[in-house]
Amino acid sequence: MGDDVGFEGLAASLVLVAVALAIGWRLRLRIQRDLVVSVVRAFAQLIAVGAALAIVIEPKTPLVWSWLWVVGIVVFAAATTRRRAPAVPGLFWISLVANGASAAIGFAVAFGLGMFPVEGRTLVPVAGMLVGNSMKSAIVVAERLVEALSEGRPEVEARLALGQPWSAASRPIVRGVLRTALSPQIENTKALGIVFLPGAMTGLILAGVDPVDAVLVQLALMYLILGGVATTTAVTALGAVRRLFTADHRLVALPRSTRDTG
Amino acid sequence: MPPPALFSFEQVSVGPREARRLERLDASLPDGGLTVVAGPSGSGKSTLLRLCNRLEVPSEGRVRHRGDDIAQRDPLELRREVAMVFQRPVTFAGTVRDNLREAAPARDDDDALAELLERAGLQRAFLERDAGELSGGEAQRVCLARALATRPRVLLMDEPTSSLDGEAAAVLERLARELVDDGTPVVWVTHSQEQMRRLADHVLLIAVGHVDRSGSAPEVFGDGR
């Protein structure tokens, strides 16, 4: 077997998709259609992305195309976050700033301190990993913040009624939400190498890179991701909570609010 | 010229046009004594109370506190001046001492905090208690002590006994009366006719967004309660 998977190898991997389909059919889970759609869609998307990436990261291609790709990732992440938590006004812009800040800080460390050379083949994948992970946490933060403030309205209003400003009245809830959003990333980082071998490292080892070199790259990326996730979640939570209070320190109407209006 | 009302409501509407909780309500609450705001569930009496400390704002109309348009007041200052005890007691994480300090961070000596507890009918030993482990009646009295920690000039009580047993409710009613006797006007919302007759110096009866009747207790109840 060579280093490349190739289309034959890819076809072989479909055996496990067939197993998943068989399980879905046998247990009457009614997920077969979704499963097929997801497999076909992932194939089409990744082939298209791979073809475009091949052009963008080609050494002769001007670096500006890689930077534009990075901008596209950040904008798409902001749009996705906004779609998932529509109750937060202005979440697109908050998320754009949050993901932009995460990418900027990550890039400053990764490229400014010389961890990686500034090339298309490093810029785009590093941005994808950074922003992809940050986006997932930002979505958790935004969704959970709305739920927690809605469920916690009695406590928030009890604090507001004492004359506390919105920032103090919401602080215990924001802290809890941030802990919830950051915990999975911290647990992932703790379990590295013991429970699972992360994607970048696995890919490098499969591509024939020395495992120690692969580990160093993976560790650097994980630390960047951890910092990026912390940045994005903090900026998203603090930006979003401000939008959920009025200028005169009242909590806005939220979905699932159970306030008694007797 | 008569002194300004404690709160006056001028053509106040609350909520979207198609689902008003209060509709062009005109009313005033006298500055002194214990005023009971009563009405059936959903009539808008809690909404009216929340207008008084700006947890709610009118969609139309104006609310005045002792003559001043409260829309022009600093909401944080207003809320410290017009304290509120809610229907269900909401204690914060930590001890009773932590709860009281949330309301008045500057009051860091236990004597001052114990005095607040005493005004709410609780002993000093409660300062050490975990607020999450109090009974409903004790928790509501801690909420009362916490509300008093901001040194309010008015106290709003939104059905404060609805989740308490008879004995705890009686204690809270007695404490409210003591506050009134000490010069702090209390506005008490209830849906209980019996409680209204027991407590009220003044009455405001609301019927689905409108004022039904208002006046002093003898005016509204006639000779016998």
Image (spheres, coloured by chain):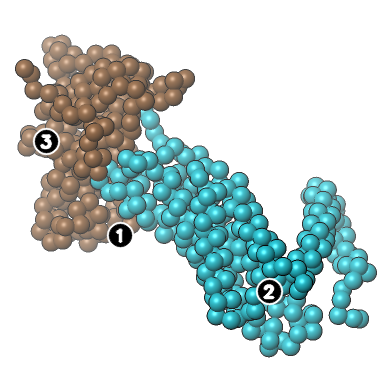
Chain colours: A cyan, B brown
Q: Residues within 10 Å of mark 3 (few under 14, many from 20)?
A: some
Q: Are marks 2 and 1 on the same chain?
A: no
Q: Quadrant of the N terminus of chain A?
A: bottom right
Q: How busy is the neighbourhood of tag 1: few (under 14 within 10 Å), some, or many (20 plus)?
A: few
Residues at marks 3 and 2 on the same chain: no
Q: Quadrant of residue A9?
A: bottom right
Q: Which residue is mark 1?
A: B94
Helix, strand or loop status at disc 1:
loop
**What residue is at 43 percent from the left and 45 percent from the top?**
A243
Please identify, in this view, whether the residue under mark 2 or under mark 1 is nearer the observer. Answer: 2
Residue A119: which disc?
A: 2
Q: How many neighbours does mark 2 have within 10 angstroms: few (below 14), some (14-19), or many (20 or more)?
A: some
The Cα–Cα distance between marks 1 and 3, rounded to whole angstroms, is 29 Å
- Residues A179 and B95: in front is A179
Rendered residue at 37%/51% (across/down):
A170
Which residue is painted at 14% across and 12% down in the image? B219
Tell me where residue B193 appears, x and y as whole percent: 26, 22
In the image, which disc is placed on residue B184? 3
Where's residue A72, x and y in %? 66, 57
Q: Chain of mark 2?
A: A
